[in-house]
Image (cartoon, helix red, strand yellow):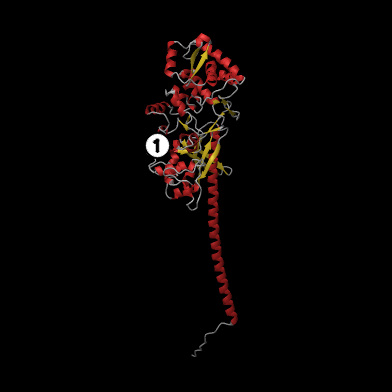
Amino acid sequence: MKLRLTPNRLPTSGETRRGVVLLAVLMVVAFLSLAAYRFNDNMMAEYRATDSAVRLAQARSIADSGVAFVLSELAQGNIPQAGTVQSISLVNGSQSATFEILTVDDESSKWNINALLQVDPTGKTLKDTLKRLQPQIPVLGDAIIDAVVDWVDNDDTIGDAGAESEYYNTLQPPYYCKNGPLDTIDELLLVKGVTPEVLFGDSSNPGLSKYFTVYSREQNLVPPSNASTNAWNAKVNLNSADLPTLQQELNTVAGEQVSNFVMAYRLYGASKQPVSTVTVLANLASGKGSSGGVSGMNSNDYTLVSTEISNKMQQASTGMAKLNKITNIMDLVSKNVDISVGSGKTQKTVTFPSPLKDPMLAKQYLPSLYQGYTTSQDVDLPGKLNLLTADPVLLAGLPSLQESDLQNIVGTRPSSMVSDDPLYQSPTWLFTEAKLDPNKIRSLERYVTGRSTAYRVRIMGKLDQGGPMGLMEVVVDISGPRPRVVYFRDLSEKARQARDAGADPAKLAGL
């Protein structure tokens, strides 16, 4: 048997070309597959990012819906309550979402930095107020206090340890000292020495923002008596030169005795020898006051005084009598008027004590006077501290108050107040309920109020299926005809960071 050996055959050129083509095709297919996979992966990432962005936008819009809800509630005179949850249907009901009101803070329960400068442009009142709060804010040093006062006062004089533009111009980037009112409380971060810890506090101590604001304000307007109208009107000025019209209006609101006393005050000015409230009440108890007279006066003297006032008003109408100014409404309680009556040997001086020294009459008429009357021509007034909601620590800084006065205020103020109660919206209750001396109340009047005019609210919006959340913080001013947002901050990103760090979403309001 013969064996035939066949040598290895080399591929032909055609076979080589086909192999190369096949290999190229395989490489192209592999590359396209990888490219397609990569494209699909990128598209999925883009889809997830887009979906996340859409859901975040939805969450923010839901939180914005909560802001609209807050504005609606405040417009109706209702104070939104923390913990309120509202459900919302999205996309024809196929999705659902909720917003929750996390916190509601009364900005009027804080001292208004700008208002303290308006009341006392020297800055001393602001400085004293800051110093009183140092025990509550341990990081608030004297140098920081001086720097804050220098930032808002209207001069370039450097305080004991403060700073003016000379210091701020050395910073990078340089800037000038404001020397004017703050636009937001956050602006204090520009002040020398003020850090986020000083302004916002930390887990163990509060910061300046707990006790100070710039958003509260007072408007010299009268709210509409009819809820169906939104027409706010200017208050009647007690210093009007048109005494007959003023007297007629006061007769309707507070009666003849109060009206006559106001006319007497404008025509003769306050007595330099005031009769105390105790004396007036003693005269009432002894029968010197009567239905035919006025509190603390006998009927004959009141008749003589009324006649003299009428004659003097005639002179005033011709410009022959100089009119006196009422500084604030509590003057009508703390002051008295001396009037000369009769002629010749029968001439005598009669002291006309304010009928409002009688707590019963004060309780009846003073709230209406505060509600509809004013002693200022300004429409916008400095924001005041709400006596009914302020921390007792802040009340302790009010001028002229002793510890017993503070205890009376805190012990007498209502724990929950009907927002439209005129008695507590004015300082009247300090006299009628807390039994403070009218002269002390007079010194407090420009600092305090019984109304809240601004609220800081934090609202969280989220989809019920989970995902991003929107967190909004707004300050709403309700001092005028309609609520308006005067401060807005989107905290959604900080909320996400806090949640990713393991924070409880229920504590996000502490950001």
Mark 1 Cα shell of 10 Å, populated few (<14), some (14-19), many (≥20): some
**Residue 339, visible in the rendered structure:** yes
**Point 58% across, 15% down: residue:** 311
Which residue is situated farthest in the bottom direction here? 2
**Point 37% across, 29% down: residue:** 403
**Residue 465, visible in the rendered structure:** no
In this image, 228 relative to 274: left or right? Answer: right
Q: Tell me residue 503's x, y (percent).
A: 42, 47
**Point 46% across, 34% down: residue:** 109
Measured along the vertical axis of the image, is residue 6 above or below residue 393?
below
**Point 54% across, 59% down: residue:** 42
Residue at mark 1: 132
Q: Give the structural element (helix, strand or loop) at label 1.
A: helix
Observer-nearest of 146 and 416: 146
Quarter of the figure that contains the C terminus: top left
Q: Amino acid at mark 1?
A: Arg
Q: Tell me residue 177's x, y (percent).
A: 50, 46
Which residue is situated farthest in the front direction here? 344
Q: Please count the marks in the image.
A: 1
Measured along the vertical axis of the image, is residue 31 above or below residue 194?
below
Q: Tell me residue 16's x, y (percent).
A: 57, 79
Measured along the vertical axis of the image, is residue 160 above or below residue 390?
below
Measured along the vertical axis of the image, is residue 196 above or below residue 33?
above
Quarter residue 76 falls in:
top right
